[in-house]
Structures are given as C-alpha cells and as structure tokens.
Image: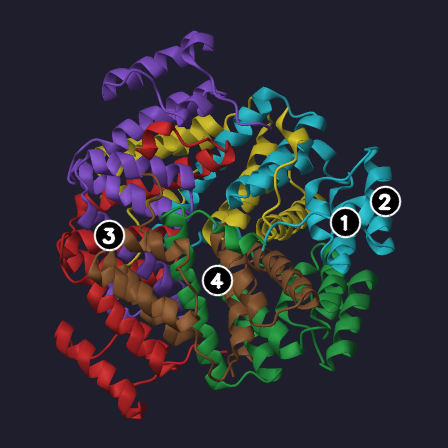
Chain colours: A brown, B green, C purple, D red, E yellow, F cyan
C-alpha cells in the first residue's frame, strides 16, 4: 500500500468537518500529512483529533512541557514523522536549542538505563512503592 | 543468571567509591538496587553514574521537567523498574497527581499516534524541515 | 553496508531453488526484494521461506485473517517494508478499505492501552488466569 | 510509585459513571484492574473507555477478529497484562486452541521477518505502491 | 490466559518427539519451560526447535559468540525469560564475568546511540554504502 | 526539525576538540554524520564519544565481537543508520560474509523466540537462577 493522502478537495463531509476544526483550532491554512493519511478511516480521524485536543490542552502542565513529553516519547519510539512534527510543535511552544539539547540527552540516557535495568532484571526497591 | 545485587559490605574499592558519591549527592543512606546490579561491571557503574549526574543536573530545564521526561521515556519503553524509580524521583521533584495524570495521557496518546503515523508511512511535511 | 539484492541471474543453485519455489507457490514472475536481500545468507533464505509457507497456510484461520494479523504486528513493530508488503498481501487476500480502517484503529488503540497498562504496572486479574 | 487500584467504593462520581458504563456494556459485576488503575486520571479513564467501545464494536470486522488483532499487537509489544486480558477476551469471542496456536505462529514469524527486513534495510518494491 | 506448561507425561506423541530430540541434543533430563509453553501449538514447537538447532550450530561463528549475540538481542528486546535463559546458555558456552560486563556495556551504549541517531534522523553516510 | 549537521568549519572550539579526538583515534579525515548531528548539544557529543571510546576498547572481548554485538542490537532496535554504520565497522573489524549471515540468522531467530516467550508469559526456570 502506498501512503495515501486525502486533500480537502477530495474529502467527504465527515473528513472536511475535522479538517475545518483542526484549521480553526491551530490557525493554519491546511492540515498536516498525518491527518490527510488518517482520513482513510474517518472515524479514526475524528476520534484521534478529539482525543489529541483534550490531551494537549494546557492544564496542570503547560503546552511546552506537554509537547516536549510528546517529542521525547516519539524519539524513544523511533517514529521519524512524529519526531519531525512534534519537534516543530515543541519549538513553536517555546522549546529553545538549549532545552532541546537537554531533552535529547535525557532521551538517550533513559534509553541506556532502561535497557540496563531490564538486562539485569533489577528488582523494584521497596522504597519506590510507598 | 539470577539478578545479583552487590551490597556495600561486599563491594570492592572502585564500587564503594561510586556508592559513596551517589549517597553524598542524594543524601541517602544506601543506593538503589539499580546501582547494586550495575556493580557487576564497575566501569559501567562509574560511567553510568557520571553520565547520569551530568544529564540530570538542572540547566535549561529544571529537575522536575527532566525527571518527567525520564519517566515518560521509561513508560514508553515498558521498563517497569525505571517507571517505578523515576516515578518516585519525579514526585520528589514536585510532580503532583494532576501532572502525573496529564503525563500519562500524553504517553498513551503519543504511543497511539506514533503507531498510526508509522502504519500509514506518512511522509514528513516540508513545513517541518525549516 | 548498502542493501544488496541478489537477482536470479547472479544467484547460485541453492538460492535459485528457493526463488523457483516462491514463484511457483505464488504464481509470480519474480520474487520480492525481501527474498533478494535475504539471499545473502542462503540457509536463512531457505529456512525463512519454508517456515513462512507453513505458518501462512490456511488452517484454523483463513488466509485473510492471517495476513491481517501479520500486517497488524508489522505496523506495531514499525517495519515500513513489512507494512507495505503485508498490506498488499492482505488486500490480495480480501481485506477491503473498511476492514483496513478498523484494523488501523485496533492497532492504534492497542498501542495506547499497551503503554498505559505497562506505565501503570497493572497487576493481572485472577479472572484472566483460569 | 506502587500500582494503585481505585475500587468503586472509594471512587468519585466521574469514575463511578465510567465503571457503571463498563459493567453495563459487558454484563460484569466489577471492572478489571486496568480500569481501576486508569482511574488515577478520570479524563483518561473516560476517554479510553469511549474510544475502546467505538473501536471494538463489530463493523466490517467481527468481534473475534478484532480481539485477535488486539491480542497479536499486545504480544508483539510484550505487554503481559494486555496479553492476559485480551487473550481472555479473544477466547470469550470464540478463539479456540487451534486458532490461538496459529495466531501465535504468525506473531512469532512476523517478529522474525520484521527484524530481518529492517536489518537488511530492504527497499520497498514498486509493486506494493499501486 | 494463564501460562500453560505441558509436561512430558501429558504430552502427545508429536510433542514428545521434539522433547526427546531436545533432551538428546543437549544431554539434559528435561526441557525448559519455553518448550513446555510452546507445546500448546505442536507445529510451532517443532519448527522452532528445528530452526534454532540450525541457527545455533557452530559455523563461521563459535557457540559462545552466537549465544552472546542471542543474549544481547534478548536484553535489547527487554525479554526477561530470554535474558535469563540465554544468560545461562552463554555462561555454559564460556562467557565469563568480564565478558558479560563488556557485553552489558555494549548493549547499554547501543541502546543510547540507537535512540540518538533516530531522534536526530541522521542521514546515512555515503561511505557506509560501498 | 530538519536533521542538522554541523561541519568542522562552522563548529565552535568544544565541538572541534571532539571531532579532532575522533579523527585522531580512527585515523579518518572527517567524522561521520552521527557526530555532526550530535554536535547540536556539545556536552552530549563529548560524553557520547568518551563513553563509546571506553566501551568499545578491546578488553575481555575483541573489537570484532564488540562490533558484532553492537550491530545485532542495532538491528534488533530497527535503527537504519546504526545498522549501516556498525555494519561497516564490523566489516572493518573482520566480520566476513559468512559471519554476517550467521549474525543475521541469530538476530531473526532471537526476535521470534523473544516474542514467543513474552506472548506465552513463560515463567523463568529455577535452573537459570543459580
């Protein structure tokens, strides 16, 4: 299967409604390729957009911290598209070069110690469980 | 191989020196199981501690944000020990229940969209590359 | 190392025998790149083809269900080549656009709840063990 | 952090409403540990239940196929809790021992060829892209 | 589903034949739990044993190197059972404590640089492709 | 974010010092893209180079075995860049085609049995723990 991207012009009303909501919420003239690809299944498109809107709304954590967490998880998962898109989003939300460098260092260090802890099958300390 | 934990009493001088450094830096009476397991290879123990100290020192990002990034990556990697230990560390650094709930939501949402983007082999938008 | 693909013309007899078996079984004029790459190690080529033939033969599950399971696992593993090749195979075996959309939704949802269950270190319910 | 499970008796009204919906939809007297763990963040609990209900409702694919896809992805992700819970759900939806054996074989085989395709960086065949 | 282990006494003839082959090849009085679990699907049990025998036979690489590679991959995959069983096998094949320490260091370091290379989406150097 | 590569000419003194150390240690006229990408965060660049030098120095294991372990882990992690770069390094350290074929077979087989062991949640044999 070739990656298929559905543009606004060829989209049906259910897909257009989601595209309109994304464009309005973000103040952008067009949606990203992720949404155009997800439009192959309109219910998944709509549900993903609604969930993402709720999850990424500022709350106890500010938008920049949320985007940096999203970027770190995407890096750990090795998703190139997600790393590019959430890297751009985190920068728009205020992540500067120094913050990015430290985020990168944490992601790398965590990957190493995650593997070491699993490789050695380290038992959880009782102190962590209180 | 059974997980082997090396206590201070049975450790050689190279291992004890690292244990002493950890206890001093953290103001704790004993080191966690992770370090006791890593002590099977003293050079890895020392190098890991030195790297971790540098990476986790507050800089452009504060300690709480760094610990939350570490926790999110550990959750994404499915490392139970790391999730427990960095969950405890993030709480000590100020993560409250509401922040933890939002971090959890971001980790789950990112896991879903990471898979969707890869499943659909979405091409990177040119706008992300500038 | 550059990805090296071994064509029929340059292949030795052990590799040609496997290529012939694949072409006969599938009724195709040439084998896919996966097999041409695997031919760098003829025993692995042969063993993989024989195992795959056995595993994918219709049995308690029909060919379409097996190909959809293969596709879902490949998506979860983030393997772009496998997602493309098993996406094509699943469509040939009868997966239509609506089925693909629902498969995509399950893969995404499972990725999210897999991470949430591990992040929260949820203990297995006794009821699942009977 | 110890895994914390929130029982109905100690739950607030938002959590109870979701628990009631799950119990009604499934005809069970209590919810599984997954939901009790997710209740630490009520919005994530509610959103996950609503999404799961939509995704797992029979449509172009029947309930058994959907549960088997969910199980296969959970196995591929190495999530022990999810493997146990969706294994039980797939059996309730009609997966018998022979089907499970074949699903297991596909998951194992896919894991192997996913790695081989990535290890050899196999280029996608043009034929897959049409 | 509870992990089900099939002992020799309750096994059918196809399973017993594989158990006998494993016991003869390894000179052990009983098979490991992995084989007892895999016996839920006799064709998968047989195919896995036959493949493993071929793959792990000494060839261009000696048995110790093969077991250390198997262990390193199992650690990287976070498989606790595999880490325990191939850790034991690698020790039987001659891996001593110093070798294990260096293997552990490589696994941890590779995990870190794997993530960093993917996080930064580093383009492959032309020099690697010749 | 576009992958950014920092050449010697535009690098500051801290980065140049690391580049000089890499070039001297390896006897090469320029560093690989990995280092040029990592230079976005000079402390991570320096720390990664120093750690890698220590980890990969011959010790109880020779250079070829260490590079093959690194390659196997990188393949298992699905890191294309790392597979290309450590494939080239392992060949320089003496891995020939036959060794590569056997390494590939082990990586594939381990991926399969890792998943099967986790899918079946196999309990660790007491014999492995002594």
Where is residue A108 drawn, in percent x and y? 63, 57
On what subunit does the disc labeled 4 rest?
Answer: B
Mark carried by residue F21: 2
Mark 3 vs mark 2: give the one in front: 3
Query: Do the dots labelled 2 and 4 sit on one chain?
Result: no
The answer to whether E72 is drawn above or below residue D46 in the figure is above
Q: Which residue is mark 4?
A: B76
Kindly state the secondary structure of the residue where label 4 is placed: helix
Q: Which residue is mark 3?
A: C101
Instruction: Tell me where residue E11 sits by quadrant.
Output: top left
Q: CA distance from mark 3 to mark 4?
A: 25 Å
Q: Is residue B71 left or right of residue D51?
A: right
Q: Is residue C115 visible?
A: yes
N-terminal label among 1 and 2: 2
**Is residue C123 visible to us here?**
no
Residue F117 position within the rendered picture, expressed as x and y whole percent measured from the top left? 39, 48
Q: CA distance from mark 3 to mark 2?
A: 52 Å
For discs 1 and 3, the disc positioned in front in the rendered view: 3
* Percent coordinates x, y for residue E15 in the rendering: 27, 36
Quarter of the N terminus of chain F within the rendering: bottom right
Disc 4 from disc 1: Cα separation: 26 Å
């Amino acid at each position: 299967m070739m990656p298929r991207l559905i543009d606004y012009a060829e989209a049906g009303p259910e897909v257009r409604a989601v595209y309109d909501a994304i464009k309005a919420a973000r103040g952008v003239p067009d949606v990203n390729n992720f949404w155009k690809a997800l439009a192959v299944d309109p219910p998944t498109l709509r549900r993903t957009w609604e969930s993402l809107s709720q999850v990424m709304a500022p709350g106890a954590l500010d938008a920049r911290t949320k985007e940096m967490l999203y970027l770190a998880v995407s890096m750990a998962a090795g998703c190139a598209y997600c790393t590019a898109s959430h890297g751009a989003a985190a920068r728009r939300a205020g992540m500067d070069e120094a913050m990015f460098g430290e985020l990168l260092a944490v992601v790398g260090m965590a990957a190493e110690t995650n593997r070491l802890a699993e490789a050695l099958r380290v038992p959880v300390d009782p102190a962590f469980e209180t």
